Image: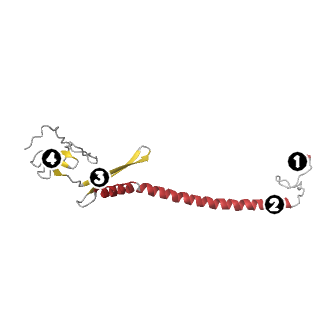
Amino acid sequence: MRDFSHLPAPILLEPLPGHFQMITEGDSSNYFCPDCGKHLCWINAIDEWTCLNCEDTTTKMEIKTISYQRVLNLGNYNTKRLEMTAQLNSDEDFDAATSALMQTVEVKIREDKEFEIVSHIESLQTRANNLKQEISYLEEKLAKLKHDQDLAQLKPETEPDPDDIPFGGEGRTSNNLDDF
């Protein structure tokens, strides 16, 4: 077995579900050797690794799983989080699969908000139509009142009947002082 004492001790902690793990040179956390199946391997470069248990020194790594997460601010200290994970085939293009996954997450996270916005737009359009109908009704009423006012101005003014008093039972006033 090879001597790896010059390397820092490997980290054997598993990452939390849903958290991204940056693969950097010198990283040794949560990687399995496909030859021996052990949990200890050391990242030599971005695409090479060395197993600490078996005699295989270097193997090319392949990306088999990609994950994308998006957090959307809903306001009032509320957020909505959506994360999707996809398995890659050996013949799939990494960049195309990543962009497709990102696009899917971006569309899915906004579906509820889009429905809300569309329904709000429809209610505003209905309200605008109702207000247009009310405006046309009020314009017709205003035109009728102006017409009635014009007719009233054309009629000759007559002196009002002094005996036509809106209160009292007989309709006429009496000159009798006892009635007062």
Kind of residue sitting beneath label 3:
Ser
Label 3 packing within 10 angstroms: few (<14), some (14-19), many (20+): some
Of the numbered discs 2 and 4, the one sitting upstream in the chain is 4
**Relative image position of residue 146 (x, y in whole percent):** 77, 59
Tell me how the rendering is colored. secondary structure
Q: Which mark is residue 150?
A: 2
**Counting residues from the N terminus, which is met first, the one under dot 3 or under dot 1?**
3
Which one is in front, 14 or 37?
37
Marked residue nearer the N-terminal end (4 or 1): 4
**Mark identifier at residue 112:** none
31 displayed left or right of 96: left
Closer to the N terminus: mark 2 or mark 1? 2
Secondary structure type for disc 2? helix
Residue 138 location (% of width, % of height): 68, 59
Q: Position of residue 59 (x, y in %)?
A: 16, 51
For residue 67, the mark is 3
- The residue identified by callout 4 is 50
Local secondary structure at mark 4: strand
Quadrant (top left, top right, bottom left, bottom right) of the C terminus = top right
